[in-house]
Amino acid sequence: MQEVHILWTSEGMSCDGDTVSVTAATLPSIEDVLLGLVPGLPKVHLHNKVLAAEVGEEFMTAFNKAWHDELGPFIFVVEGSIPNEKINGEGYWTSMGNDPITGQPITVNQWIDRLAPKAWAVVAAGTCATYGGIHAMAGNPTGCMGLADYLGKDFRSAGGLPIVNVPGCPVQPDNFMETLTWLLYQVAGLAPMIPLDKELRPTWLFGKTVHEGCDRAGYYEQGDFALDYNSPKCQVKIGCWGPVVNCNVTKRGWMDGIGGCPNVGGICIGCTMPGFPDKFMPFMDQPPGATVSATLTGAYGTLIRKLRGITNKTVNKEPKWHHNRPELTSGYEPRQIF
């Protein structure tokens, strides 16, 4: 089976948090993929500076080979926001490696221009790479953007795929590895075209909201809201954006099914969304419409909660015919046999 390389650059405006997060994946783990323990996958070689043993020009070898069509099929993973190098003045915003002739830094934008059209698939890992994230917020001096803003939403890779966005700040580890595994199966001819929504996110991962998978959602429906961060109840009144945010972390958890923001008492601040962070600030304040929806739900939920309380007391009692007296009161009547 053909070997596939994963060229992963985190030289955009990045904290390398997505790389670190992915090391916690279990479904599958990155080790399982690289060791060939996932049935049906091609042999995979990973080139990521945080996880690499090589440094300097030795690490850059695979990237240069891919640029010169000497590497074979590869998946190009971009981590970090893409700065606007058209407004860099006399310098540059971010780079990876140096030009061997001029000795000048090669910007991450140049690497994207060189590698994205040649890649079998292009993946944006984390919200900075997908939609710009923190570095692209209002007032930034770098003109940062997401990968689809830079390449265009109509971009298609050498494999005929649009950019695949896996947002999250950082990316949920199993979400990324599950997406990567799908693409590797697709390279091997064992999977159909990966299904993406209009924001280029995998539909099976981002098709539902945080609220729809949240353990606290029942409290919302009953109009029972948390007023501080020590409460197990619905957190909408203390700033949770879960009802309008596409993310599966409440259902999936964070590491091996454990954790996830609202699951452990943290509010959802919308980090998987294209409008993050600007449209979700200031954090901790009630989202727009939360007061109205909470008030309406509160009135309805209070009544429902009381009615359910009555029913709860009823069904918490055993039937009256459960007793140890010398008579049968269950209503049983023996049949007459003629």
Image: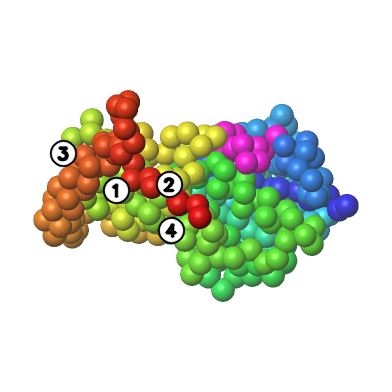
Q: Is residue 21 magenta?
A: yes
The local secondary structure at tag 2 comes to loop
Assess disc 2: are there few (<14), some (14-19) or many (≥20) residues with their C-alpha within 10 Å of its C-alpha: few
Assess disc 1: are there few (<14), some (14-19) or many (≥20) residues with their C-alpha within 10 Å of its C-alpha: some
Disc 1 from disc 2: Cα separation: 45 Å
Disc 3 from disc 4: Cα separation: 26 Å
Q: In this rendering, would 145 be left or right of 217?
A: right
Q: Which residue is mark 1?
A: 218
The local secondary structure at tag 1 comes to helix
Give x and y (percent) for residue 66: 76, 54
Q: Residue at x 65, y 33 (%)?
A: 51
Disc 3 from disc 2: Cα separation: 58 Å
Q: Amino acid at mark 3?
A: Leu
Give x and y (percent) for residue 193: 67, 67
Q: Are marks 1 and 2 in contact (CB under 8 Å)?
A: no
Q: Nearer the viewer, mark 3 or mark 2?
A: 2
Q: Residue at x 53, y 62 (%)?
A: 203
Q: Are marks 4 and 2 in contact (CB under 8 Å)?
A: no
Q: Which residue is mark 4?
A: 208
Q: Amino acid at mark 4?
A: Lys
Q: Nearer the viewer, mark 1 or mark 2?
A: 2
Q: Amino acid at mark 1?
A: Gly
Q: Give whichever of 262, 312 is nearer the camera.
A: 312
Q: Which mark is residue 227?
A: 3
Q: Are marks 3 and 4 in contact (CB under 8 Å)?
A: no
Disc 1 from disc 3: Cα separation: 16 Å
Magenta-colored span: 19-31
Q: Amino acid at mark 2?
A: Pro
Q: Is residue 247 visible?
A: yes
Q: Residue at x 22, y 46 (%)?
A: 311
Q: Earlier in the sequence, mark 1 or mark 2?
A: 1
Q: Which mark is residue 334?
A: 2
